[in-house]
Image: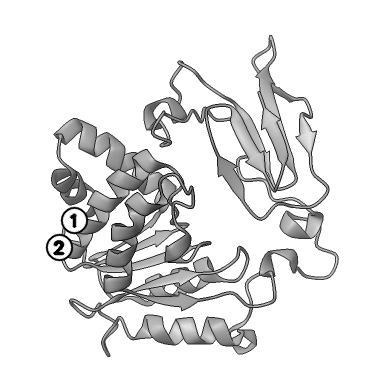
Amino acid sequence: MEPDVSQWDSGQRRAAARLRELVDRRGRPVRRHRGIYLYGRPGRGKTMLMNRFFAEVASERKRRYHFHQFFAGLHAAAHESGSIDAAVDALLGAARLVCFDEFHVHDIGDAMLIARLLDALFARRIVLVVTSNYPPAELLPNPLFHDRFVPTIERILAHLDVVAVDGAVDYRALGSRGARAGFAAGRYVVAPQWRALPISAAGAWNTAVAQGGTNQRSRYRWALGVCAPLRRTAAGSSSTSSHCAVSQPPLRIMLHWPNVFSVGKSEMCRR
C-alpha cells in the first residue's frame, strides 16, 4: 500500500525534500549536484519516493533501473565491448540523472565491477539516486572481503548524501479492508511464471539464459514465505511441488551459489 502524501512519516518527508533539491525550478536535474543514497528496511517507501521523484523530473536525460537488471546489462555490454566505460556509455548515453533501485553488494566479484561502475558514473558527474536495504557501511558484509570494498564505500560517501527512510511502519503489510492480494494475503509473488535464473560464479544473472536459454536452468517461483521449484510436465505445463515454507515472511532473500537460496535466518531452499 502506498501512503498518501499527507500520511508520510518524518523519514519519507525528509527524503522527499532532499530529492527535490536535485532539480531546479523547472524540474530539470541540477548539474554536478551531490546524489542521494536512500536506505532502510524493506517496505518503508524508498522505491515509492524514487518513483515519484523520477516521474516529476522534466528531462529526457534521466534513467531509472532496478539494479539487478542494469547489472546484468552491464555484464553483457562489458563483455561485448571489452570496456566498462564503453558499456556505461552504451547503457546510459547522455543521461544526467540515474536512479538505481534495490542497490546492494554481496559478492566480491560483483563488488569489483560495481566499484568500476561507480567510478565511471562519478567521473561523468552524473547525479545518482540509489535505494538500498543497507547503509553504505554494510555493503559487502562478508568479513572476509569487506575491507576490499571500503575504498568504494568511502567514494559513495564522498559523492552521495545518505538519508535514512526507516520508519516504524512496513507499508507492504497494509491494504484496504478485505484485501486478499499481495502482502495482505501473507505472500508476495516475485515471479509468478517459471523463469531460468542461473547465477554465475561472480553472482550475476546470466541474461541470455534468463531470457530462455537452455543450459543450466534453475526454475523457481519465489514468494515471501514460500520457495517452490517448478517442474515441467509431459504436456509442457508447469506444476509446483511445495519444497519449503517459513512461518513468517522473510525480510531478505540472500543469493548464494546456484540452486541454493537462504530465506530469512536459517531456512534453506535447495533444488
Q: Residue at x 15, y 48 (%)?
A: 85
Residue 23 is drawn in which quadrant?
bottom left
Are the two marked residues, 1 and 2, in contact with CB atoms closer than 8 angstroms? Answer: yes
Q: Is residue 149 left or right of residue 210?
A: left
Q: Residue furthest top?
A: 234
Q: Is residue 94 left or right of residue 196?
A: left
Q: Nearer the viewer, residue 106 or 250?
A: 106
Label 2 Cα crowd, 10 Å radius (few <14 / some 14-19 / many 20+): few
Q: Nearer the viewer, residue 163 or 91?
A: 163
- Residue 193 visible in rendering: no
- Which quarter of the image is occupied by the N terminus? bottom right
Three-letter amino acid code at disc 2? Ala
CA distance separating discs 1 and 2: 5 Å
In the rendered image, residue 160, in percent from the top left (x then y), is placed at: 32, 73
Residue 166 is drawn in which quadrant?
bottom right
Label 1 Cα crowd, 10 Å radius (few <14 / some 14-19 / many 20+): some
Q: Residue at x 69, y 32 (%)?
A: 269
In the rendered image, residue 47, in percent from the top left (x then y), is placed at: 51, 66
Residue 41 to residue 241: above or below:
below
Residue carrying label 2:
123
Three-letter amino acid code at disc 1? Ala
Q: Residue at x 44, y 51 (%)?
A: 140
Label 1 secondary element: helix
Label 2 secondary element: helix
Q: Is residue 5 left or right of residue 34?
A: right
Number of numbered markers: 2
Residue carrying label 1:
120
In the rendered image, residue 259, in percent from the top left (x then y), is placed at: 58, 27
- Residue 241 visible in rendering: yes
In the rendered image, residue 2, in percent from the top left (x then y), is placed at: 62, 72
Residue 203 to residue 16: above or below:
above
Q: Residue at x 55, y 30 (%)?
A: 195
